[in-house]
Amino acid sequence: MNYTINEIAEMAHVAKSTVSKALNGQKGVCDEKRKEILKLAGKMNYRPNASARALAQHRSETIGLIIPADVGYSLSGIYWAEIIAAVAEEVNKRNYNLLLIIPSKENPTKTIENIILKKSIDGVIVPAEQLTAEELRMFTEFNIPFVLQGRTPLCKHYCVDVRNTEGAEMLTGELIKKGYRHIGCITGPESFQYTQERLEGFKNVLRRENIEYAPVKSTLYSLEETRKNVIDFVRNNPELDALFISAGGEFVFYIIDILKEERKDLSKFGIAVFDDYRPFHYMPFNIISAKQPIKQMGTQDAKILFQLIEREEPPTMSLFDISLS
Amino acid sequence: MNYTINEIAEMAHVAKSTVSKALNGQKGVCDEKRKEILKLAGKMNYRPNASARALAQHRSETIGLIIPADVGYSLSGIYWAEIIAAVAEEVNKRNYNLLLIIPSKENPTKTIENIILKKSIDGVIVPAEQLTAEELRMFTEFNIPFVLQGRTPLCKHYCVDVRNTEGAEMLTGELIKKGYRHIGCITGPESFQYTQERLEGFKNVLRRENIEYAPVKSTLYSLEETRKNVIDFVRNNPELDALFISAGGEFVFYIIDILKEERKDLSKFGIAVFDDYRPFHYMPFNIISAKQPIKQMGTQDAKILFQLIEREEPPTMSLFDISLS
DNA sequence: TTGAAAGCGCTAACAC
DNA sequence: GTGTTAGCGCTTTCAA
């Protein structure tokens, strides 16, 4: 059976408000009664109805996590899986629920708006690249605490990210250390802040090393766009002997395919990648890859969000270090 | 602003019950009023408070999706990501919410029990391998509609799965077609139904072909267990010229590593895998892989669950075909 | 067709 | 310390 607070109160011969106080650890109920009630509730396996609680408290004890719609195919399969797992762990600790929000392709903003207006969540974790101006306005207007996973030029806000520039510098530096002098850079979408920062890191190192050769190409992550752009790039830069790729996942495989097609000798070619995707390490050539502390970031996302919900003052920006792997 | 039904009623000069009826498409309100109310609600961007609705209707309009706790690292990163994406799509269509349940390591059943008792969800999708007897009892006792992704010896219930035996037969058959005659089989945990079925498929084909050589080894999916068991296996079966691996993901990479270490000539060795993981196709040797219609399964999971929630009678078992890729 | 009112299960303010 | 009561915002029944 599934009991209500009324039934528990009746069985304990007390008022339901007393039960409520006892269960919520509030004062105003003597130790003896409290113990008794707790024991009874335990025995009856009683859990307050979440909807009733939410209605009375104006708080759903649920947080949202927005995930890019193409999660199943995108370059970031592992990335988001780990973020989800880390967030879920924090959510479990606090006996909250985790609402997964995958915006519909047709009307992404609507999906989020519905959830906000229905008051289904107390706060939300948002991938920075996917935040739109309209969503930002919504969160502000309806006073929804939110945390950015990553950063966006769109707004300064509580965020969790890696040190992109430094990471890119490490990777590029490593290529140079290995003797490469004709390093190109392939980036993802230019509008993403991490793209800009990683590109900056790339350029910093080449400038510092007085290397003038530094061709760059941006592209969307889709297979088609990537093919088109990278083929062009490789043909226009025949001296290329290494590549810094500012993103990871399958994007890297697309690019490697092209290098093969274009008859680059992959046993000599240098590849540095801003991601640590397990399968890379099983590939038949050397890839220098950057390890992001994904789990730690997910944990931090959740922690900050909970602090915001509790009206505490969390750190504005949490930046994590990249390591080579 | 965020309006309540009372405010909308007041603005429309009608009773809130009328607003409720109008919005929920119930009869008992004249067309004119209905239109007016709908228009007003639209203009005001009104959405009924989900908790209040849930409380009144005994229905949260939220479904749960249980994901194995080690999703971030497990062999199935892509698998679950695609299931999630597919389920989310169906959930969005119906204006439901998706609650992601990642059971805590310490007390997985508790995590699920809490959510059930709190009445946070109307139904739940459960990975078959992870269903325990206690969870099964809970779902039954509390009358929670649930759908199994996969099958389990534990119970006969609404389920969505692939034709494991046939898939395994295809893969093994393909190895034979390529001339391999010393094929071994590495499986995951023996208790999993899919392990048993795939193993059966493997044996079927060898029997049919009158091949007596058919060594088999089961192992847990962890790196350590896999290493230990597979090294033993390879050494004990020196004639081995091919392997049918009854699972996929990183598990396959672990095994390939060992084959290399044991000095198998991978350019000759045959490998068939019950999974289609993108990175396989970028490996420097041939892998025969099986493609599972993951997205379709996720969609079906959700559809069946919604039918159960609506008290319709969905198909008991949905089996999908495997194809080689 | 319309609206008043009860009730869903809980919390919290306020008497006692 | 304890209980009564009034909501929270909705749905649903029932009387008008």
Image (cartoon, coloured by chain):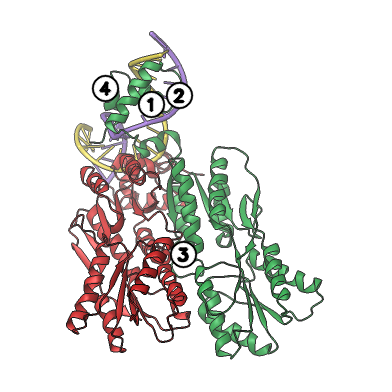
Chain colours: A red, B green, C yellow, D purple
Q: CA distance from mark 1 to mark 3?
A: 41 Å
Q: Are marks 2 and 4 on the same chain?
A: yes
Left or right: residue A189 compared with residue B211: left
What amino acid does circle 4 point to?
Glu
Q: Chain of mark 1?
A: B
* Residue B26: mark: 2
Q: Chain of mark 3?
A: B
Examine the rendered structure and indicate whether residue A45 appears above or below residue A204: above
Q: Earlier in the sequence, mark 1 or mark 2?
A: 1
Q: CA distance from mark 4 to mark 3?
A: 48 Å
Looking at the rendered structure, the secondary structure element under dot 2 is: loop
Examine the rendered structure and indicate whether residue A147 appears above or below residue A4: below
Q: Are marks 3 and 2 on the same chain?
A: yes
To which residue does mark 4 refer?
B10
Q: Are marks 1 and 2 in contact (CB under 8 Å)?
A: yes
Q: Earlier in the sequence, mark 4 or mark 1?
A: 4
Residue A79: where, in percent of width, then height?
38, 66
To which residue does mark 1 refer?
B20
Looking at the rendered structure, the secondary structure element under dot 1 is: helix
Examine the rendered structure and indicate whether residue B74 appears above or below residue B123: below
Q: Chain of mark 4?
A: B
Nearest the eye: A250 or A261: A261
Looking at the rendered structure, the secondary structure element under dot 4 is: helix
Q: Residues within 10 Å of mark 3 (few under 14, many from 20)?
A: some
